[in-house]
Amino acid sequence: MIRILCALLAMVLSCSPSTAQSIREVDGLTALIEAPDLAGQRVKIPDVLIGHATLGYANGYIEGGTITLTQPWVDRTDFRWLVPKCGELLDVAACRMTIVGDLTFEYGAVSMTNVDFVLPDLDAAFDRDCRRACVGTRSEAFCERYCECTMSELKAANLFDPLNSEQLGKALEAKVKPITAQCSVAVDDQLPKASD
């Protein structure tokens, strides 16, 4: 009897939709355009802005449109992250992520179920965005130290999470500007001066 149960369990596990299909990676625009052909497939879409997240559904905003994300979820605990940070529609690093799910296309609407949210690494996102903004005007050495200092000081002041979870309003900007200025001066003082 146990062998039969084990055999049945093995068959069910090996045939589940999330393990039986390969994952096709596509960009958001391709997912929308090729949705009729991708329907029923498991797809991975990078750089999706998640908004209006609730336990029942969320919207995935991509170039060209929206994908409705619905239950069941691969990991419901992701919503401990998503609901407070992405309950509204805010274009912040905390809400930009890769999603993997089963794509459906019905009545011209694109949606996904069995969604797995690949939550962003906010430290890496901050460092990447900070360096990208900095390198055009300062040296690589300056930018590396400046971005490290800024992230460290923002975390120490408990401003890193709010900065990644909400738009930069006047109140938050007033708290962040002195930190960025302080780090700029500190890094300038640390770097060797160019001789004339």
Image (cartoon, rainbow, N blue to C red):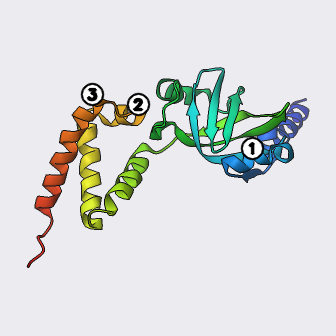
Please name the residue that numbered disc 3 is placed on.
Answer: 171
Please name the residue that numbered disc 2 is placed on.
Answer: 166
Image x and y of residue 182, in percent:
15, 47
Please name the residue that numbered disc 1 is placed on.
Answer: 32
**Is disc 2 in contact with disc 1, using a CB cutoff of under 8 Å?**
no
Quick one: 65 or 16, which is closer to the camera?
65
Q: Reading the chain from its start, which is encountered first: label 2 or label 1?
A: 1
Quick one: 178 or 64, which is closer to the camera?
64
Quick check: 188 left or right of 119?
left
- At horizontal 69% and vertical 31% (from top left) the residue drawn is 69
Alpha carbons under labels 1 and 3: distance apart: 38 Å
Quick check: 117 left or right of 147?
right
Quick check: 175 left or right of 28?
left
Q: Reading the chain from its start, which is encountered first: label 1 or label 3?
A: 1
Q: Secondary structure at mark 1?
A: helix
Amino acid type, callout 2: Glu
Q: Quadrant of the N terminus?
A: top right
In this view, 105 is above or below 83: below
- At horizontal 63% and vertical 30% (from top left) the residue drawn is 59
In this view, 101 is above or below 185: above
Q: Quadrant of the C terminus?
A: bottom left
